[in-house]
Image (cartoon, grey):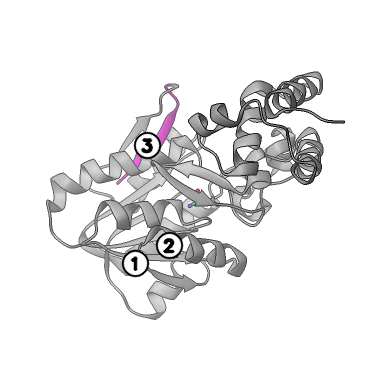
Amino acid sequence: MKMTIREAQTWASSFLAKQNIEQAELEAEIMIRSLFGWDRSQLFVHWNESMPMSRLEQFKQWLNRRINHEPIQYIIGTQEFFGREFQVNSSVLIPRPETELLIEEVLQQAEQIWQDQPITVVDIGTGSGAIAITLSLEKPNWNVHTVDISKQALQVAKRNAERLGAKLIFHHGNLLEPIIRQKMKVDLVISNPPYIPSRDIQTLMPEVKNYEPILALDGGEDGLVFYRQIISQSFSVLKRLGMIAFEIGTDQSEAIQQLFANSGAKSYQVLPDFQGIPRVAMA
Ligand code: GLN
């Protein structure tokens, strides 16, 4: 069966829509472009050419994965974050736009506290490296360290750092343990830790619960396990004028402020995301 690129895209779009994939039209376009490595304008240039058989086969495989609710980012292998392209696979969480907000708020706060001083930062649970790599590219004089307990995740993060030209230091281990072991002192601890309460994992979309790493999602019984551990470990690594910055989940604003208050933090605040949901917590 011969078809043009345009026909393949239209056909894929209605195929995905029939299977209740929400942004069927957009996703069909993204897959076609990724299949050939085209940007939007290149797509239109090639619009009426015929779709090569070999690519058609691959395209069909991708569509079948997508209707099984595999996230499109794992299928095409990338996700944009803070204007840069990150490679992702099923051993890392797909970077989210909410996390871009965490970065923006931290950059703003850091500007006020440290101006242009070269500070030392540690990102906990780096996953794809989205946070650590972005910080080190936005702030080239910062000394950025990052930790993950998953060796597979560290591999992905290292590859992303290399491709994007970021220089940072990777540690394998649990939360702040490698930093404590090396007796390092840091100015800023940042993390988007797993924060979904264990019993809620089953209520997540199939894209998330069936494909994203449980290690990156499950925040223990009340979803707060990692915040507690990170805050208590931070006493050993933070300098006197130090900051902790977290992404938090829905309904965690009160609890996180309580944790900060109990830890004796001098000041703390929680900021909302674009939907008005409290999302960024800093102390
Ligand atoms: N730091 C990574 C991100 O924000 C991974 C976070 C995680 O796996 N919980 O995308």
Label 3 crowd bin: few (<14), some (14–19), many (20+), radius 10 Å: some
For label 2, the SS is helix
Q: Is residue 1 left or right of residue 204?
A: right
Task: Name the residue nearer the viewer: 10 or 185.
Answer: 10
**Of callouts 2 and 1, the N-terminal one:** 2
For label 1, the SS is loop
Residue holding disc 2 = 161
**Of callouts 1 and 3, the N-terminal one:** 3
Check residue 167 in the rendering and tell me which mark sits there, or answer none.
1
State if disc 1 and disc 2 touch (CB < 8 Å).
Answer: yes
Residue drawn 65% across and 43% down?
35
| As drawn, 232 above or below 112 | below
Q: Position of residue 28 (x, y in %)?
A: 67, 29
- In the rendered image, the quadrant that contains the N terminus is top right
**Badge nearest the viewer, 1 or 3:** 1
- Residue type of the residue flagged with mark 3: Leu
Spatial CA span between label 1 and label 3: 22 Å
For label 3, the SS is helix
- Which segment did they paint magenta? 276-283
Q: Is residue 99 left or right of residue 199?
A: left
Q: Position of residue 208 (x, y in %)?
A: 68, 40
- Residue type of the residue flagged with mark 2: Ala
Spatial CA span between label 2 and label 1: 7 Å
**Of callouts 3 and 2, the N-terminal one:** 3
Residue holding disc 3 = 101
